[in-house]
Image: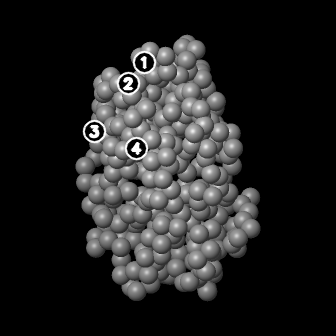
Amino acid sequence: MNILLVHLGVIPVKTYGGTERVVWYLGQELVKMGHRVTYLVKEGSQCDFANIRFIDPSLPIEEQIPDDIDVVHLSYIPKEPLKKPYICNLHGNLNDQRLLDKNTVFVSRNHANRFGSDSFVYNGMNWDDYGSPALEHKRTYFHFLGEAAWRLKNVKGAISVITHTQKEKLSVLGGTRLNFRMGFRFTISPRIKFYGKVGGEVKNNLLLGSKGLIFPVRWNEPFGIAITESLYFGCPVFGTPYGSLPELITKDVGFLSNNSEELRQAVENVDQFSPKNCHLYALEHFNSRKMAEAYLSKYTEVLNGRTLNEKNPCLINIQQEKFLDWK
């Protein structure tokens, strides 16, 4: 199969960039499986396993698709249908009732169901890139992983959970101690350490030293690559029961509650969770081979003239509150 992957960004990603990481690993896995892959991406991108074409922003995407392409996979929702067989992804959330393309694929069951769809594929990582973690490594703190300046990610809640324990510490990956974007937040506690935006070996080593991920999001998380990356390094997840979290986090690999006191108690009992179980769970369920196989099934459907959704997906319920409940 000759596949065109279209992404309106630069690949590969060096630090943050969940969608870029997914697009990269998908193409890599498809090539391993014997398919031809071409990326249509922003100038500045490079790739050693697939062809690269740079997007011309002055031309419609339709006019930039090579003739020999069998199927097009867009990492965004197109404004109009393409002539070639295609699928498209919604990676984030919307809070309006626009009609989405009938070939939309979501990134979790909950994500799809909120738009009246059952078309989804879990994000998968090429875990070979992450190395083989030493799961017996000494763990001395918990971690938060995400865009800390984004209030929906609730770093303030994560800090509160940790500071209300007797002695636990928190490493914040993705934020700074002083932040004006959150209406002025300055964290005084010496038990909280900030690393800013980190990636690669620095991030991996920090995850390996962590007892668990504190993830008290206040929105319906579509998927959460921070979750699967943390699990891979043996970190159970302590988060809120919103969006995809209840389907991703089983009782063996984490604890969910929107009550900070209940999360604090669970954190204090982190030893009940096995780093090995967390690692094996991520390795088995959220790998790039499973993701590629699932997308190949979607490609086959559209190549056979079918749409992925009988009707255009549309958000069923507009969220009225700015932030989901956190007690």
CA separation, marks 1 and 3? 33 Å
Q: What amino acid is labelled 1 in the image?
A: Thr
User: At which x and y percent is residue 177?
Assistant: 59, 21
Percent position (x, y) of residue 150?
A: 49, 34
Considering the numbered disc 3 on the image, is that residue within a helix, a strand or a loop? loop
Of the numbered discs 1 and 3, the one sitting upstream in the chain is 1
Whichever of callouts 2 and 1 sits on the residue coming sooner in the sequence is 1
Q: Is residue 216 above or below residue 133?
A: above
Marks 4, 3: nearer the viewer = 4
- Amino acid type at image mark 2: Arg
| Chain-order first, disc 4 or disc 3 | 4
Q: Which mark is residue 253?
A: 4
User: From the image, which quarter does the C terminus lie in?
Assistant: top left
Q: Residue furthest front?
A: 136
The one of 274 and 159 positioned closer to us in this rendering: 274
Measured in 3D between alpha carbons, the distance from the residue under mark 4 to the one under mark 3, in whole angstroms, is 31 Å
Determine which quarter of the picture holds residue 28.
Answer: bottom right
Residue, disc 1: 165
* Callout 2 crowding tier (Cα within 10 Å): few <14, some 14–19, many ≥20: many
Looking at the image, is 109 positioned above or below residue 190? below
What residue sits 40% from the left and 44% below the top?
253
As measured in the structure, the alpha-carbon distance from the residue carrying label 4 to the one carrying label 2 is 16 Å
In depth, the one of 20 and 316 nearer the eye is 20
The amino acid type, in three-letter code, at marker 3 is Gln
Badge 1 marks a residue whose secondary structure is loop
Q: Are marks 2 and 1 in contact (CB under 8 Å)?
A: yes
For the residue marked with disc 4, what is the amino acid? Val
How many angstroms separate mark 4 from mark 1 (CA)? Answer: 20 Å
Q: Which residue is mark 2?
A: 264
Mark whose residue sits in front, 2 or 3: 2
Q: Is residue 37 left or right of residue 300?
A: right
Report the disc number at residue 320.
3
